[in-house]
Image (cartoon, rainbow, N blue to C red):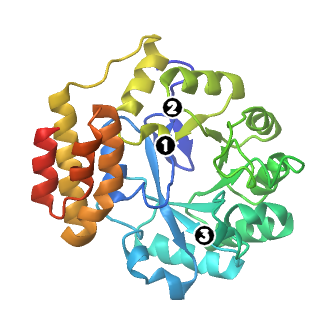
C-alpha cells in the first residue's frame, strides 16, 4: 500500500484500509454498507440509532440495530444527550453483537439539535466529556469512537478541544466533518481545522466532507495528515468509488467506471438486497433514493427516471433497469 492508503486500527481491530463509509441516516443501511465493503471500503459505520429505550424500538430503529451477519467489525452509531442512556444503549448493542460503538456529535439536523443532541452537543464540553466517559466505561472491552464537526459556528471552532476531551476519556478514534453545525451541508468543507486536530492529539483522526473524486481524497489526506478518509455522499450511486480511490492512491492513475453490465448487476443486487432486508413495501420505496443516484451516473433521461422512481414493485424496478 502507499503512504496514504494503509491499514487502520480501531482498538484491536485492524481494518484492511483507511477508506471508511460515513454513517448517513437513511442511506448507510445494511445493504449499502455491504455493497460498499465489497467494492473496497475498509470499514463502514451504521446509521444513527437513538439511545432512548422508548425510541429504540420504533420501526425505523429496528432496521438500524446490529445485523450479526454483517462483516466485522460491526459499528453502531448512537445518538443522545444523556450519559446514562448512552451507556445503557452501548451495553445493549454490544450484547447484541456490536464490535465498535460510535457516538454521534456531528448530525446538524434541526430535529436532532433541537433536543440538544448531535452537533448541538459541541457547545457543551462538560456534557461531551460526561457522555464519552460514560460510554467508554460502560463497554470497557469495546472500542468507542466519536463523530463531530469543526464546531458550532465560524466563531467557535472547538474541534481541537473536543478531540482532546475525547482522547482523555478513552475515545479511540475521532471522525471530523469539515463544517460547523451552523454550516449544515452548505458551502465548502474546510480541512485546516482537521489538520490542526491531527497535530493536537495522538488518536487517529478521520477527515470527512466533500471528497467526491479520488484526487480530492488524496489532497485531503496529504494536507491534513489524517489517518483515513470518511466518505459519504461521494460514494452515493457509485460504490466502486472506494476501489477507484484506492487505485489512485496506490498508482496515481484514474480507474475508469465499471462496465455498464457490471453496473447493472450491482444495481440489480442492491435492489434485491433492499427488498430482502426491508420487505417489498419499504424496500421499493427506500430503494428509490439509491436508484436516483445510480440514474445520475447512467445519464438516464428525466422521463425514464420518473418511471423508475414511481415503480411500485421490485419487478417493475428491475424492468426499468433493463430499459435504462
Q: Position of residue 55 (x, y in %)?
A: 51, 83
Q: Which residue is mark 3?
A: 79
Would residue 37 be visible to someone looking at this image? no
Say above or below: 249 vs 271: above
Which quadrant of the rendered structure holds the C terminus? top left
Say above or below: 175 vs 207: below
Please identify the quarter of the rendering in which residue 304 is found. top left
Say above or below: 280 vs 243: below
Q: CA distance from mark 2 to mark 1?
A: 7 Å
Instruction: Please tell me which of labels 3 and 1 falls first in the chain.
Output: 3
The label shown at residue 243 is none
Q: At 27% from the left edge and 54% from the top edge, which residue is drawn?
A: 309
Q: Secondary structure at mark 2?
A: loop
Would residue 60 be visible to someone looking at this image? yes
Is 232 on the left-hand or right-hand side of 182?
Answer: left
Is 74 on the left-hand or right-hand side of 261?
Answer: right
Instruction: Please tell me which of labels 3 and 2 falls first in the chain.
Output: 3
| Front residue (pair 85, 189) | 189
Q: Secondary structure at mark 3?
A: strand
Q: Position of residue 81 (x, y in %)?
A: 70, 75
Please identify the quarter of the rendering in which residue 194 is found. top right
| Front residue (pair 142, 59) | 59
- Asked whether disc 2 touches disc 1, contact meaning CB atoms under 8 Å apart, the reply is yes
Q: Which residue is mark 1?
A: 233
- Residue extending farthest to the bottom is 54
Q: Which residue is mark 2?
A: 212
Q: Secondary structure at mark 1?
A: helix
Q: At 70% from the left edge and 68% from the top edge, which residue is drawn?
A: 113
| Front residue (pair 156, 306) | 306
| Front residue (pair 238, 294) | 294
Is 261 on the left-hand or right-hand side of 274?
Answer: left
Amino acid at each position: 500500500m502507499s503512504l496514504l492508503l494503509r491499514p487502520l486500527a480501531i482498538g484491536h481491530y485492524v481494518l484492511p484500509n483507511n477508506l471508511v463509509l460515513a454513517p448517513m441516516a437513511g442511506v448507510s443501511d445494511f445493504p449499502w454498507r455491504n455493497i460498499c465493503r465489497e467494492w473496497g471500503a475498509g470499514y463502514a459505520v451504521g446509521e444513527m440509532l437513538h439511545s432512548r429505550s422508548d425510541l429504540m424500538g420504533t420501526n425505523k430503529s429496528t432496521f438500524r440495530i446490529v445485523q450479526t451477519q454483517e462483516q466485522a467489525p460491526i459499528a453502531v452509531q448512537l445518538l443522545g444527550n444523556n450519559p446514562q442512556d448512552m451507556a445503557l444503549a452501548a451495553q445493549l448493542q454490544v450484547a447484541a453483537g456490536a464490535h465498535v460503538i460510535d457516538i454521534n456529535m456531528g448530525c446538524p439536523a434541526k430535529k436532532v439539535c433541537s433536543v440538544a443532541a448531535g452537533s448541538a452537543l459541541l457547545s457543551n464540553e462538560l456534557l461531551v466529556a460526561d457522555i464519552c466517559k460514560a460510554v467508554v466505561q460502560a463497554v470497557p472491552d469495546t472500542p468507542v469512537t466519536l463523530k463531530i464537526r469543526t464546531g458550532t459556528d465560524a466563531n467557535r471552532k472547538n474541534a481541537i478541544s473536543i478531540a482532546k476531551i475525547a482522547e482523555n476519556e478513552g475515545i479511540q478514534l475521532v471522525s471530523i466533518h469539515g463544517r460547523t453545525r451552523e454550516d449544515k451541508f452548505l458551502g465548502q468543507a474546510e480541512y485546516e481545522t482537521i489538520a490542526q486536530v491531527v497535530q493536537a492529539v495522538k488518536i487517529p483522526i478521520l477527515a470527512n466532507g466533500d471528497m467526491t473524486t479520488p484526487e480530492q481524497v488524496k489532497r485531503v489526506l496529504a494536507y491534513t495528515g489524517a489517518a483515513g478518509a470518511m466518505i459519504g455522499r461521494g460514494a452515493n450511486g457509485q460504490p466502486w468509488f472506494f476501489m477507484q480511490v484506492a487505485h489512485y492512491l496506490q498508482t496515481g492513475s484514474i480507474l475508469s467506471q465499471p462496465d455498464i453490465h457490471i453496473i447493472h448487476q450491482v444495481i440489480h443486487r442492491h435492489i434485491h438486497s433492499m427488498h430482502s432486508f426491508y420487505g417489498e413495501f419499504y424496500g421499493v420505496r427506500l430503494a428509490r433514493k439509491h436508484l436516483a443516484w445510480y440514474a445520475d451516473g447512467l445519464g438516464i433521461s428525466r422521463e425514464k427516471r420518473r418511471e423508475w422512481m414511481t415503480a411500485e414493485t421490485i419487478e417493475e424496478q428491475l424492468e426499468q433497469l433493463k430499459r435504462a
